[in-house]
Amino acid sequence: MLQYLIVVKIGRLIARLAGPRAGALPGRLDTCQQLADGATVPAFDVLRAQSFAGQFWVAVAFGFLLPAFPVLGVFALARPGLLAREIAAGVLLVLGGFMTCALAQVPALTIRLGGTMTGLRRMRRQFGRAGQRPLPAGSFGLPKRRDFWIACAIALAGYAVIAYLGFLARGW
């Protein structure tokens, strides 16, 4: 599950940089690591990990937005000609693609989160305290390997159409 593996890798780097200020981050990352490995995780932990990963992907997406401002400033000051604008537009186009792919993970995680909550409700009717039990195999709330790639493909296809229309309007 690449969605969670990327969260774990970036999160561990942030936790290492933050040191003792990381707080509960390492514990949340451990659950995401278990999901990335395909391990059996209690349903409430899956729910928490999905919520955390969604918030994390939003932060990653806006992290791609931050370099856009210095790029625009540097290219505007360095050489305000046509070439500088073209290079800046290319860099911003790539950053926008990464941001689009990162933001596409949030709906994919939200859909799985809804499946997890539905599974918890069904399990609660059958077993009472359902949160400590894992979701049944094949449950819609369990992450799938293809989630990351499907979300990226759909979002990047839309982004490519918008970029193409922008290029047409620009006269390229």
Image: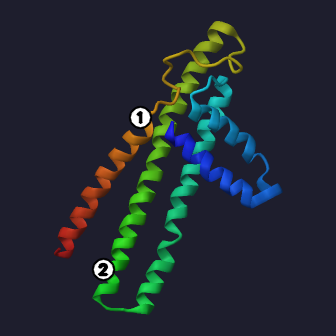
| Residue 92 position (above or below residue 142) | below
Q: Answer whether labels 2 and 1 touch (C-beta < 8 Å).
A: no
Task: Name the residue furthest top.
Answer: 126
Q: Secondary structure at mark 2?
A: helix
Residue count near mark 2 (Cα–Cα under 10 Å), binned few <14, some 14–19, many ≥20 = few
As rendered, which of 55 and 80 lies closer to the eye? 80
The answer to whether residue 55 of the structure is visible from this angle is no
Q: Looking at the rendering, in which quadrant would you find the C terminus?
A: bottom left
Disc sitting over residue 86 in the figure = 2
Residue flagged by tag 2: what amino acid is it?
Answer: Glu
x then y, percent, for residue 92: 39, 70
Whichever of callouts 2 and 1 sits on the residue coming sooner in the sequence is 2
Residue depicted at 63% across the width and 38% down the height: 32
Q: Which residue is mark 1?
A: 146
x then y, percent, for residue 4: 56, 41
x then y, percent, for residue 23: 79, 50
x then y, percent, for residue 97: 38, 59
